[in-house]
Image (spheres, grey):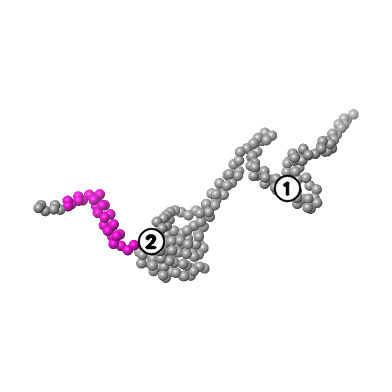
Amino acid sequence: MEAAKPAPKRRKTKANRLTEALEADADKDEEAEPRGVVYLGSLPNGFFEPQMKTYFSQFGEVTRFRLSRSPKTGGSKGFGFIEFRQESVAKIVAQTMNKYLLGDRSLVCKFKPKDECHPKMFKGWRRKPFDPRPRRREKQMLSVNDRPTVEVDGQAVPQLTELQVKHHERRRKKLKGKLRQLEIDYDVDEILNGGGTADNEAEAEEPEAQEQKQPKKKKRRFVP
């Protein structure tokens, strides 16, 4: 039988050197110690992502970290996760820092095995945190203020929604009830309607009463 031919040597090119370097790094990663994750609970106020990385870097290299935040306010929920380059370092941190008094809180540190770590545990950990309340407030203001307009007496007036009309009517009735309890004779409709009575009350008035309310015309006097 013919002897097996040796594998041809790769040419010394940039592409081959890069491939060899990547293969060597992959072999090192397989032989290296796996990474370790620690759960951090009962974090004090003001202890955010920069403080997490700075404080726990004294134990070893920190690869990833994530602080759980509220989707409504963007504030901290008081717990998070931190990943170390070496699993042994993560175990030491979980043992030494558990029940450690940090600020006014007693820390809760637990080592998380790989099978208990969710694949998306550190999803978006590089994303800069932000407070969504100003954007939501601006959107709400635009939805309220940017209403269709109706032309009234040659002027563009924002059109009221049915809900706004109900709110105005409810407040008007509440104000009338308070004035009635205090025995104050005050025409609320005349003020709110710009000097006129409400339509429903005007229709209920008798024609004679409407005639009496009309001001008398003054006679014009001429200078002799």
Q: Earlier in the sequence, mark 2 or mark 1?
A: 2
Q: Which residue is mark 1?
A: 173
Mark 2 nearby-residue class (10 Å; few <14, some 14–19, many ≥20): few
Among all residues in the image, which is located at the extreme left?
1
Query: Do the residues bearing badges 2 and 1 touch, measured as CB atoms within 8 Å?
Result: no
Q: Is residue 220 left or right of residue 110?
A: right
Q: Dot 1, crowdedness within 10 Å: few (<14), some or many (≥20)?
A: few
Q: Nearer the viewer, residue 102 or 95?
A: 95
Residue at the image position 35 percent from the left and 64 percent from the top: 86
Tell me which residue sits at (63%, 42%) in the image: 161
Q: Quadrant of the C terminus?
A: top right
Percent position of residue 25, x then y: 28, 57
Query: Would residue 20 be found to the left or right of residue 222 on screen?
Result: left
- Which numbered circle lies on residue 122? none
Instruction: Tell which of 53 and 100 is nearer to you.
Output: 100
Residue 21 located within the stretch drawn in magenta: yes
> As displayed, is residue 31 above or below residue 217?
below
Q: Which residue is mark 2?
A: 115
Q: Is residue 209 left or right of residue 167?
A: right
| Three-letter code for the amino acid on which mark 2 is drawn | Asp
**Magenta segment main secondary structure:** helix
Residue 61 appears in view: no
Q: Which residues are magenta?
A: 7-34
Q: Foreground: 103 or 224?
A: 103
Q: Can you see residue 15? A: yes
Is 181 above or below relative to 93?
above
Q: Secondary structure at mark 1?
A: helix
SS at circle 2: helix
Disc 2 versus disc 1: nearer the observer: 2
